[in-house]
Image (tube, coloured by chain):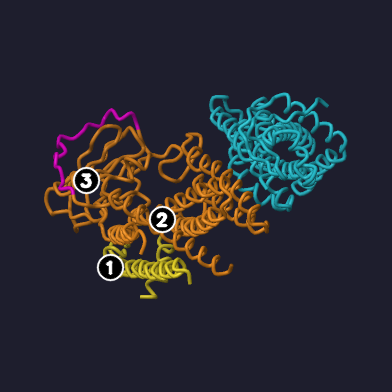
Amino acid sequence: MKHWWWKLLGVLLLLGASVAALRVPLSPALVHVEPGRIAPGPVELTLTGYNTHFAQEGVKVFLENGGERLCATEVQVLSPTLVQARFDVPEGLRDHLSNVVVVDVTHGRLAIPGAVFTTGTGDGSGVESCAETLADAAPVKTFTFPNRNILYESIRNLCFHVPMWFAMIVLMAISVWKSVRALGSNDLDDDRAALHAVQVGLLFCGMGLVTGSIWARATWGTWWTNDVKLNGSAVTALIYLAYLVLRGSVQDPHKRARLAGIYNIFAFALLVMFLFVVPRLNAVDSLHPANGGNDGFGDLDLDDRLRTVFYPACMGWILMATWMYDLRLRAARLQERLER
Amino acid sequence: MKKLLTSLPAALVGMPLWAQAPGWVEDSLYRSGKINAVVVVVAVILVGLAVWMFRMDRRITAMERDRAKGS
Amino acid sequence: MAELRWPCRGNASTDRGRVRPTFAPVDFREIASLLRLELALDLRQRAAWGGMLLYVVSAVYVSFLAVKGGLGTATWNALYWIILLFAAFNALARSFQREEGGRQLYLYTLAHPRNVVLARALYNTVVMAVLSLLSLVCYLLFMGPEPLGGADVPQFLLAVVLGGTGMAAVLTLIAAIAARAGNGLGLMAILGFPIVLPMLLAVMRASKLALDGVAWSVNATYFGALLLLHLITITLAWLLFPYLWRD
């Protein structure tokens, strides 16, 4: 088998990354605080953790508001994931929203920012930080995925959904390169290669749209939304479907090669502008991370541990997609020769 | 197995938007160990895909070799 | 009409209708002559202009009948752009269909194809600029000028003109492709719509911001991006057009 090494590499990377993406645990985090609204006076908060292992002793709970820290008067650990804390909330807190912070030796500092809401606020003058300091515990770093708000476990989808787009872009780039060559030479094989690259690319585009839609329903609550990246993916699908329609409406092979090639190059250039330039403009709002004012994927969601699974997954899918295109092209060449 | 596969998208869709103190914490696919079923399913699908592509590649290479020999 | 000369640079050949693309530098005199040619042809077919305007008036009137009441600013804006989009498809589809194969080939023996496409693109942008402003007038007449009350009018006009010319820049090459494929307006709409869509979204956003009366600095990103888009599309059309004619 020709070039077996990168094909095998693709399969191994894909298998390894997919299994890891599903098996690696999420890092411990606080996910819920009950009740959400508090009033001055005695308050009892129940905190739920995910993947936490709270010990019976040594757990400290704080409320952070307006730069001041309130200590819990009593902390009770009900289970490894459930903590109850009692506070004496003073009058006149500075901010409406307070952060809930849990510190212990195993996990270090876990927090939910802005978890509890207070109506009666003041100038924060009567509030003082309590004496207890945060134990500077550096928890043991295990290999876990980040546990983000809204996403939770579905962050694993990163290693399945996003590589679809990477594979699609690589394949469309291959098709543009072949189109450029087809315009330069008069070789119909380049045009055939461009067509098959577009076909496999469209398959990955479709899969990306479907998987993205499922993920959106699970996290944002809707199958589709007016978001710049979604518009970009819809436009990509429409452009390459139009490419196929254009090919279908021209009979002469050489003319078809030229017209399709010109459209491919033109559309790809504009597409690249739309996919990569416009979302970076701060003027554009977006639900997606790293676009339009949201914090970059770089430092928050995509930390190093997730990246060591994400990049191999991307590479694996790109190699598989290229292999698929390669197979289709070779089969088409053989078929064309048979029909001659 | 099939039931799990078909119920997976439905489960994802049916999951509420984490507004309540979650009972899902305990019965999420991950916690209850059912994730292993998903892992096996995904692995089977990917291995099957790889095997199919490998065999297709072999067949095409054989045809190309025949073609080159001038059949 | 000034004498049109073929800019022979040694590599160019018109062997059996074969037009080899060369990187001839832009010949402004030739482009000027071609523009005059376009204008002359258009003046001769004044009915075509009437047709374009009638299309716009009909579309606006239908919208007026359908909506009747007061529209929110966002909807008012969006409806205008949708009407203009389809009017643009209509107007630009004709630009390459005026000549059939033989006459077009004759044109390319007289003028370099690259100059032809530049002249056509320029002419189309002027046509679209005029059409977008005329459509706006028509739209204001029927749908009411209330949204302009709180708007930064020069900004809005700039957005309208940039949007129109942007459509022309993008759709010139598409019209050429569709005409060459022989399928005219239908194929042009299919090919052109996904390509125009991103630009349309940007210009809709820019004009909406202008209607909200925001400062120039806020909208400047969009205007800058639109101008860049004009530049890129016309450059691409200039590069790719001759390949349409390599038989």
Does the CB distance between marks 2 and 3 fall below 8 Å?
no
Task: State the image quarter where residue A265 is shown.
Answer: top right
Task: State the image quarter where residue B63 is shown.
Answer: bottom left
Label 2 and label 3: CA atoms lie apart by: 33 Å
Q: Which residue bears the numbered disc 3? A: A102
Determine the chain carrying the residue at label 3.
Answer: A
Mark 2 neighbour class, 10 Å CA radius: few under 14, some 14 to 19, many 20 or more:
many
Q: Main structural element of the magenta stretch: helix, strand or loop?
A: loop
Residue C173 at x, y percent in the picture: 66, 41
Q: Is residue C125 left or right of residue A157?
A: right
Q: Which residue bears the numbered disc 2? A: A161
Viewer-nearest of discs 2 and 3: 2
- Identify the hue of chain A: orange
Residue visible at 81% across and 45% down?
C58
Q: Are marks 3 and 1 on the same chain?
A: no
Viewer-nearest of discs 1 and 2: 2
- Identify the hue of chain B: yellow
The magenta span reads A122-141
Residue A291 at x, y percent in the picture: 44, 40
Mark 1 neighbour class, 10 Å CA radius: few under 14, some 14 to 19, many 20 or more:
some
